Amino acid sequence: MAHRAFMRKLFLLLALAGTLPAAAQYTVVLQLGKLPGNTTADSVYLAGNINDWKPGDSARRFTSDGAGPGKLVLHGPAGMLTFKLTRGSWDKVETTASGGDVLNRILKVHGDTTIVVDVAGWKDRYVAKPKVRTALPTVRVLRDSFWMPQLARSRRVWVCLPKDYEAGNKRYPVLYLQDAQNLFDDSITAYGEWGIDEAMDTLEKEVGGIIIVAVEHGGNKRINEYSPYDMERFGKGEGAAYTDFLVHTLKPFVDSALRTRRDRANTWIAGSSMGGLISLYAHLRYPQVFGGSGVFSPAFWVAPDIRKDVLRQGSYVTGKVFFYAGEAESDSMVIDMMKIYGLLHQLSHAKMQTVIRAEARHTEAAWRREFPGFIRFVTKREPKKNGPKF
């Protein structure tokens, strides 16, 4: 009954949302205040949730007329702006006065506003402490340069094996993950890691061993590869070709090289942000291949056409779908996700779970906390149905 009440409330909310007038547009002026020495205004960029965290986005560069401080003028609807300042790359991101990491800046936009932003330091101006490799011995490079014929480029692919993999001839389920740079090893990520290997080390006794296959993202190709649709702001979507690579090139290789359980019920896919978008799309496009998907903080804002694919393919989706979002990510994150959840819930035959955290931000730390819940959900064996009892 509680679930039915929730769904009635959700559908009413979405119905009302569809009747609202177009969102008002506001102007936000970010004005540079105190800066470290020898910093020119036109060397400063904004990287945030409005540009998929591109550190050197020329459209988000501060400018100065020479008479006043540098500024950046933004136009958009009410919502939550999350950002950091850089000098064109993550190696030159803003820091504390002692060179330490700073949290994302958050600005709630509900009208025209001007704010002054101070920068205490830049990362490249401090002697970096060498990062310690944190990956467990179960993590290794499957192939350093894996050719992707569908995209005519190569990519490093990682694998995390169960602890007992070398001890016998057992076969294991496989989880395909996106953004491999951020999953296992803190020494190679700029954002922190999910701790997938540590999580599986802890969970293995509870849920059994799982082979994790993780594909590195393509840097400046990331948005395009993870979007199934062409985008006015970011260009051509290559998501269809990327999912073809996963299914027709990578999976056959993994199944031949490792002891996998190849059936749909034991093949899953997951990712966050753009990786969450492409993971759901892969489940929709290949429901005969993937029996589960983890959709973490999906970037549905960049891909409104995902709704069309849910309408077209949703009835074929089986298995399990896990949705997660944080209310502090943006004003639209949860409602965008719940619209797709509600539609898929109506159409599909999948078992679905949704987790929403009130204070959670768009970070690896948040996804790290939720990953074990996804694993427990996707691996849980459902009782067999013996038919109705009279």
Image (cartoon, helix red, strand yellow):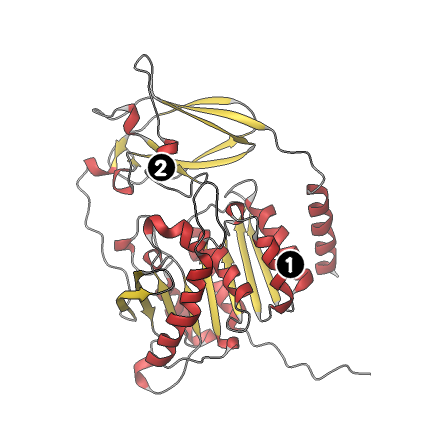
Tell me the amino acid under the disc marked 1.
Answer: Leu
Tell me the amino acid under the disc marked 2.
Answer: Asp
Q: Which mark is residue 174?
A: none
Q: Which residue is mark 1?
A: 311
> Considering only order in the chain, which callout, 2 or 1, is on the residue closer to the N terminus?
2
Query: Residue placed farthest to the left in the image?
Result: 127
263 in relation to 306, above or below: below
100 in relation to 202, above or below: above
Query: Residue placed farthest to the bottom in the image?
Result: 169
Residue 164 in view, yes or no: no
Q: Please indicate whether residue 110 sits to the left or right of residue 15 in the image.
A: left
Q: Which residue is mark 2?
A: 57
Q: Mark 1 to mark 2: distance in Å?
A: 34 Å
Question: 195 or 56, which lies in front?
Answer: 56
**What residue lies at 52% left-to-right and 60% top-to-bottom?**
281
On-image quarter of the C terminus? bottom right
On-image quarter of the N terminus? bottom right
| Secondary structure state at the residue bearing disc 1 | helix
Q: Position of residue 215 (x, y in %)?
A: 35, 62
Q: Position of residue 227 (x, y in %)?
A: 46, 53
